[in-house]
Amino acid sequence: MGYSIGQVAKKTGLTAHTLRYYEKEGLLPFVRKNGSGLRVFSDSDLGWLTLIECLKGTGMPLKGIKQYIDWYMAGDSTLPQRLEMFKEQKSRLLEQMAQLQKHMEKIDYKIAYYEEIIARGEQGIWERCPELKAERDRIYGKMVEEKEQKSA
Amino acid sequence: MGYSIGQVAKKTGLTAHTLRYYEKEGLLPFVRKNGSGLRVFSDSDLGWLTLIECLKGTGMPLKGIKQYIDWYMAGDSTLPQRLEMFKEQKSRLLEQMAQLQKHMEKIDYKIAYYEEIIARGEQGIWERCPELKAERDRIYGKMVEEKEQKSA
DNA sequence: ATAATCTTTAGAGCTAACTCTAGGTCAAGT
DNA sequence: ACTTGACCTAGAGTTAGCTCTAAAGATTAT
């Protein structure tokens, strides 16, 4: 029912140092201490850590996470802010995922390109692989266009 | 055909400071300078910046990007390393995307949860919304299980 | 021509998020 | 009782990736 900081470190993959740091930064205001001053983490604390991991993993800085926790501590009057925060985080997440898709296209192109060159050499690659050239033009050309529109 | 550092900054969204920093770190070994010492970026340099953005955006540190550029400069003997690098980056990217999907589930759950509570209050939410409770158990319970397996 | 704007370098400064150290306390095994 | 290992606090140190400054030279607009 209660976990030591070391056990939580193992469970979460964070170090004990990092857990203490998070606490110092106000991210774990729920963790209790026993009579000897040792931290005792509950299952609920593990839940908080999971949420922190989620927000951190979707690019929220620790300050933003602390803001959420402060809102939570402040009670029901902050429900709208908390909802709004998750909605914003969701839209950021959708953008991130779209961006990663685009990056994936470029990386897939590079892999196809290098495999072709390693297999058959650089000479005549565009004549040999018109579909690879088309791919390059699509990915590369599109990006340049976007950039130029942005700056124009 | 040639762009000043300020023009490139606008095109890419990076600052001129950052571009110089990248050059100093060895990420832009191709950028020429004109007779007065001013940098002149070519379209090919913009292509390199796009690639750098892609690798950075998929979590590669600048050091790793420099390694790729060093391999490129070293010539054809490093083709296999470069292919390997992109393959590793692709697998990291797939992991990232899977992770973001999981995070999305948690965030969607939070949004549904807060919307329900804001609309109708906290009391009796689990009786009122059994599917929300099931969602919570699925997301939350699954995570706890995984963590415990990992640490056991 | 001259003022405003850009660019140059070298190097200092900054922020986020850890990461570690020192010196001490606590708990479990022998 | 004693050793071993986990834990405590306060605070210093580290790393990545910028971000800014100062002083000087280059470019552009009027």
Image: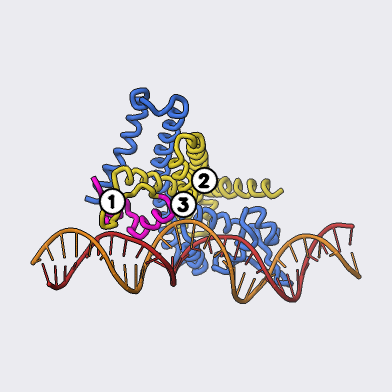
Chain colours: A yellow, B blue, C orange, D red
Do badges 2 and 3 share one subunit?
yes
What residue range appears in magenta?
A1-27
Q: Is residue A87 left or right of residue B37?
A: left
For mark 2, give the secondary structure.
Answer: helix
Please say whether residue A26 is one of the residues in the magenta stretch.
yes
User: Which amino acid type is marked by label 3?
Assistant: Leu
- Give me the residue at 66% from left, 62% from top: B41
User: Which amino acid type is marked by label 2?
Assistant: Gln
In the image, residue C16 sits, relative to residue C22, either above or below, namely: above
User: Which amino acid type is marked by label 1?
Assistant: Val
- Give me the residue at 44% from left, 32% from top: B114
- In this view, the residue farthest toward the front is A35
Given residues B67 and C27, the one toward you in this image is C27
In the image, residue A83 sits, relative to residue B22, either above or below, namely: above
Do badges 1 and 3 share one subunit?
yes
For the residues bearing labels 2 and 1, Cβ distance under 8 angstroms? no
Q: Quadrant of the N terminus of chain A?
A: top left
Given residues D17 and B27, the one toward you in this image is D17
Neighbor class of circle 3 (other Cα within 10 Å; few <14, some 14-19, many 20+) is: some
**Real-space Cα distance between discs 1 and 3?**
22 Å
Q: Is residue D3 left or right of residue B53?
A: left
> Which disc, if any, is residue A62?
3
Type of secondary structure dominating the magenta stretch: helix
For mark 1, give the secondary structure.
Answer: strand
In primary-sequence order, the first of circles 1 and 3 is: 1
Which residue carries the number 1 mark? Answer: A40
Neighbor class of circle 2 (other Cα within 10 Å; few <14, some 14-19, many 20+) is: some
Please say whether residue B46 is one of the residues in the magenta stretch.
no
Q: Is residue A118 left or right of residue C13?
A: left
